[in-house]
Amino acid sequence: MGWIKKIKESRVWKSYFREEYDDTSRGRTRRILSNVWFHIHPAKISKKAINPSYTLCLGGISFLLFIILTVSGILLMFYYVPDVNRAYDDMLDLETVVPFGIPLRNIHRWAAHGMIIAVVGHMCRVFFTGAYKPPREFNWVVGVSLLLLTLLLSFTGYLLPWDQLAYWAITVGTNIASYAPVVGPKIRFLLLGGNTVGQNALIRFYVLHVILLPTLMMLLMILHFWRVRKDGFSRGL
Amino acid sequence: MDDEIAHKSDRMSVSRRNFLRTIGWGSIVAFLSGSLLAVVRYLFPKVSYEPSPSFKVQTPEDYEIGTVVVDKPHKVFIVREENIIYALIAVCTHLGCTPRWFPDEGIFKCPCHGSRFYKNGINFYGPAPRPLDRAFITLAPDGRILIDTSKKFSSDGRSYGEGYLGDWKDPRSYLEV
Ligand code: HEM
Ligand code: FES
C-alpha cells in the first residue's frame, strides 16, 4: 500500500492530520479527546486570541448568518414549490397571504447579502493579518471553497423566485459559465438540464440550493472549525 | 510459528493476503468510480421537451416588404427585405437575453445591458460583440417557410459554439423572393 503511505506523507494530509495515532491505550484515548464531534470547543483558549478587535468576529458572523439562512430557508420550503407554474405565485403568496411571510423572505434575502459581505470580510481579515501562512495554509484553501459555496448558494437561490429578474439573471449567469474553455457549454447544459432556463433548470437549482450545497457547506465548515481549533488563532494561544 | 509463516509469504512477490487485498480494494474502487460515472451520465438528459428548433411559418407572400415579424414562441425575428427574407435568432450575442423589436425606431434593443441592433441584426451600441445570428431558412415543399434555429450563420462566418454553418452569404441563411 505504497500510495496510502504517499498520501499520508503529502503536505495536504499533514496539514490536516499532524500526528500518527498509535494503537495503544493512550493513543485511543487521545483520539476520543481530540474528536471534533465530541469537543468542538477547545480545552483552553487565551483571552488575547479571541479579542474581537483582531478577528472582527467575521467568521463567527458568517456562521451565524448561515444558521439564520438555514432556519429561514427551511421555513420558506413549507410554502415554496419549485414548479414553473407555481413558484412565482408561491412567492406572491408569501408576500401577501402567508402570516409573517414578508419578514421571512426579507430575513433570508438580507442574510444572504450579509453572508457574502461577512465571508469576503473574513477573508480580507485573514489576509491582512497573515493568518493564512503555514501551518494554516490549507485552511485557507478550505476557506476559499467555503466562499465559492456561498456564492453558488446565492446564485442558485436567485433563480427560485422565478420572476423576470431571476430568469434573466440565470440566463446571463449560465451564459457566462459557457464561456469557460472546452467544458463551458457542457457545464451550462448540465446546470440547466437543457438549453434554456426551464423546469429542469428550476428543479436542479432548487436541489442544489436546499440540499447539496448546504450539506457540502456544513461538511467543509466542520473541517474548517476543527482545523482552527487545532491550530489555535494566529494571534497565538 | 504463525508469525514466521506470515513473514515468509510477505517476501513473495504476490502473497495471498496481498492478492486478496488488491482484489478487495480494487473492486471497491471500481464500483465507486463506475457509480460516479453513471451519476454524471444520469445528470445529462437524453430527451429534451423544449420546443423543436425546426418549425414552419407562413409563406413568403405573407410578409410585407420592409417589415419585421416577431415570432415569440420560436424566438426569431423574420425580416423581409426587398429581395430576401431571413430569420434573426432572438438571442442577444452578449449574454443571451431576448432583444426587443421597436418598430417606431426600427431597431432591436436588449433589456439586459442595453445592446442595440439595426433591423438587419448588426450591432451598433452596447456590449454585444457581434451581430445577431441568422437561422437556417428554406422553402418547404408545401410553400411555407421552414426555419431551423439549431443551424446558425454568423455575419463573419466564424463559429461561436455548436451548429454554426457559415456566413450571411451562404444561400441557406436567406431566402430569395
Ligand atoms: C440550508 C440552507 C438554505 C435553505 C434550506 C434555503 C432555502 C431557500 C428557499 C426555499 C428559497 C426560495 C424562497 C425565496 O426566494 O424567498 C431561497 C431563496 C434564496 N436563497 Fe436560500 N436557502 C438556504 C441557504 C442560503 C444561503 C447560504 C444563501 C446565500 C448566501 C442563500 C441565498 C438565497 C437567495 C439570494 C434567495 C432568493 C431570495 C429572494 O429572491 O427573495 N440561501 N432559499
Ligand atoms: S445580454 Fe443583451 S446586452 Fe447583455
Image (cartoon, helix red, strand yellow):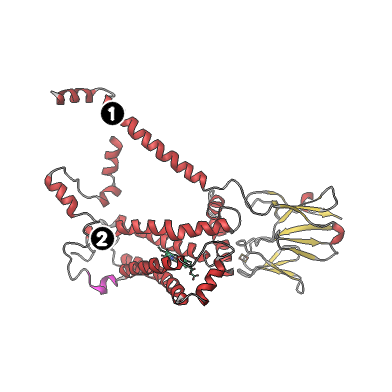
**Percent coordinates x, y for residue A111 in the rendering:** 41, 71
Q: Quadrant of the C terminus of chain A?
A: bottom left
Q: Pinpoint the chain carrying mark 2.
A: A
**SS at mark 2 in the image:** helix
Q: Pinpoint the chain carrying mark 1.
A: B
From the image, tell me which residue sits under label 1. B18
Camera-side residue of B111 and A214:
A214
**Percent coordinates x, y for residue A37 in the rendering:** 25, 56
Residue at mark 1: C-beta within 8 A of ligand 1: no
The vertical placement of B2 against A110, above or below, is above
Residue plotted at (19% across, 25% down) = B6
From the image, tell me which residue sits under label 2. A228
In reply to whether residue A227 is colored magenta, the answer given is: no
Within 10 angstroms of label 1, few (less than 14), some, or many (20 or more) residues? some
Is residue B148 something one can see in this rendering? no
Q: Number of callouts in the render?
A: 2
| Quadrant of the picture in which ligand 2 is shown | bottom right
- The stretch in magenta equals A50-56
**SS at mark 1 in the image:** helix
Within 10 angstroms of label 2, few (less than 14), some, or many (20 or more) residues? some
Camera-side residue of A71 and A170:
A71
Residue A65, by quadrant, is bottom left
